[in-house]
């Protein structure tokens, strides 16, 4: 935004960094937004105490940006449904280059949001994926513009999934799909006819120590972005991704720690049936839910009290379920040990060396 915030898209075309800016923006609350310019929406969110830190700085830049601030917000939705175990958010933007962007929100701090992510380990389709397909189909009915679909974290997964499963006439209008460190698709989703038809338009970006983006595997080629920090979960934050003169700074490949996590998770999940994965995920959620917290932040803020609630909930699990939880945790430790001290196959996924970086 500092480098190109004042440069219209008609002068410097939309690129991968613009995609990441909009994907991060999708985490902002859309409550009350109907149809307005993005700059006006950003200014409305700059009330004292409403948004802090990097998010506030991003909104301040968007509020005066000639590049993205002039975009028109067409349809913004956000849903949190505990019964369906769904956390979903999306917005559509009409850019002044004649295209439209469909942007999906990633996982927020709610326990429901994280539970839904974990459900991907055993479910062929989670509720937010189905909702993303409906949203992409419905939000593009009244426009014939070429489409870009994007998101960060789970939002990147939703961008790819919805582009695979949407109506053929919608898919034909998609010129690019951006997945920013989002989990991969299930084997069943990749077997869909729509995947082969959209695959060449998917652009996947991972930080060099990616943890989230390699979950469930990454079939499509990817580019590795240099990010600050040593831990993958820190590098998952879009604000850690490094940009120079309007373009990402790229790395030649993923770090070995990221590849180790990839092999470990594949090994671990491969040793459990979908039913066992579900049982483990449900048990972990039930234990955390016993704290009466709605978000991970709330759990951390009162950790001494919440830790006791977690220990109590663990002790009250059904004996057989508790045994399966212990077995799953033991299996994860064993999978890590096997892959930590064994030569690994670093060729499971490779960075995209065929497409030059965006200008």
Image: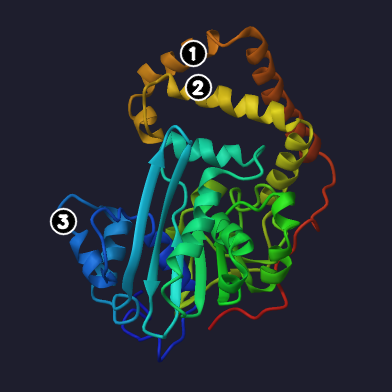
On the image, the x and y values in percent for residue 296 come to 41, 34
Q: Secondary structure at mark 2?
A: helix
Q: Decide: marks 2, 1 in contact (CB < 8 A)?
A: yes
Q: Is residue 267 visible?
A: yes
Q: Quadrant of residue 70?
A: bottom left
Q: Secondary structure at mark 1?
A: helix
Label whose residue precedes the other's in the sequence (3 or 1): 3
Residue 47's disc number: 3
Pick the residue in front: 169 or 187.
169
Q: Is residue 181 visible?
A: no
Q: Earlier in the sequence, mark 2 or mark 3?
A: 3
Question: In the image, is residue 259 above or below residue 355?
Answer: above
Tell me if mark 1 has few (under 14), some (14-19) or many (20+) residues whose alpha carbon lies within 10 angstroms of its own: some
Give the residue displayed 67% in from the left and 30% down from the top.
277
Q: Mark 3: give few (<14), some (14-19) or many (20+) Cα within 10 Å.
A: few
Q: Residue at x 76, y 39 (%)?
A: 340
Left or right? Give the position of 70 relative to 214: left
Residue 283 placement: quadrant: top right
Outermost residue, left side = 48
Please identify the residue farthest to the bottom as the structure is shown: 11
The residue at which mark 1 appears reads as 313
SS for dot 3: loop
Please name the residue shown 64% across and 73% down the image: 201
Callout in the foreground (2, 3): 2
Residue 69 x, y percent position in the rendering: 29, 75
Q: Residue 176: give x, y in percent of width and height.
A: 57, 74
Pick the residue in front: 163 or 178: 163
Q: Which residue is mark 2?
A: 286
In terms of image quadrants, where is residue 326? top right
274 horizontally vs 137: left or right: right
Looking at the image, which residue is at 58% across and 49% down? 212
- The dot on residue 237 is none
């Amino acid at each position: 935004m500092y480098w190109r915030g004042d440069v219209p898209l008609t002068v410097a075309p939309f690129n991968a960094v613009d995609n990441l800016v909009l994907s991060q923006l999708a985490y902002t609350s859309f409550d009350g937004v109907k149809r307005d310019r993005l700059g006006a929406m950003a200014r409305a969110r700059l009330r004292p105490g409403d948004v802090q830190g990097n998010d506030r700085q991003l909104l301040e830049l968007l509020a005066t940006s000639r590049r993205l601030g002039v975009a028109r917000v067409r349809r913004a939705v956000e849903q949190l449904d505990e019964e369906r175990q769904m956390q979903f958010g999306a917005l559509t933007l009409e850019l002044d280059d004649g295209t439209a962007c469909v942007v999906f929100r990633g996982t927020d701090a709610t326990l429901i949001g994280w539970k839904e992510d974990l459900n991907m380990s055993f479910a062929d389709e989670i509720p937010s994926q189905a909702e993303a397909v409906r949203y992409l189909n419905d939000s593009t009915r009244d426009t014939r513009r070429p489409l870009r679909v994007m998101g960060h974290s789970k939002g990147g997964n939703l961008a790819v999934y919805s582009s695979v499963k949407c109506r053929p006439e919608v898919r034909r209008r998609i010129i690019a799909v951006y997945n920013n460190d989002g989990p991969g698709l299930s084997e069943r989703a990749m077997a869909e006819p729509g995947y082969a038809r959209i695959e060449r338009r998917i652009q996947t970006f991972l930080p060099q120590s990616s943890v989230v983006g390699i979950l469930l595997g990454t079939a499509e080629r990817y580019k590795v972005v240099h990010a600050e920090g040593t831990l993958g979960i820190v590098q998952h934050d879009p604000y850690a991704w490094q940009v120079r003169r309007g373009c990402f700074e790229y790395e030649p490949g993923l770090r070995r720690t990221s590849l180790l996590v990839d092999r470990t998770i594949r090994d671990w999940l491969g040793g459990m049936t979908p039913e066992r994965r579900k049982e483990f995920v449900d048990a972990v959620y039930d234990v955390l839910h016993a704290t009466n917290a709605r978000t991970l932040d709330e759990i951390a803020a009162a950790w001494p009290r919440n830790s006791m609630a977690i220990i109590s909930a663990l002790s009250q699990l059904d004996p057989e379920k508790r045994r399966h939880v212990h077995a799953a945790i033991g299996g994860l430790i064993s999978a890590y040990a096997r892959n930590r001290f064994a030569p690994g196959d670093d060729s499971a996924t490779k960075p995209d060396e065929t497409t030059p970086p965006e200008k």
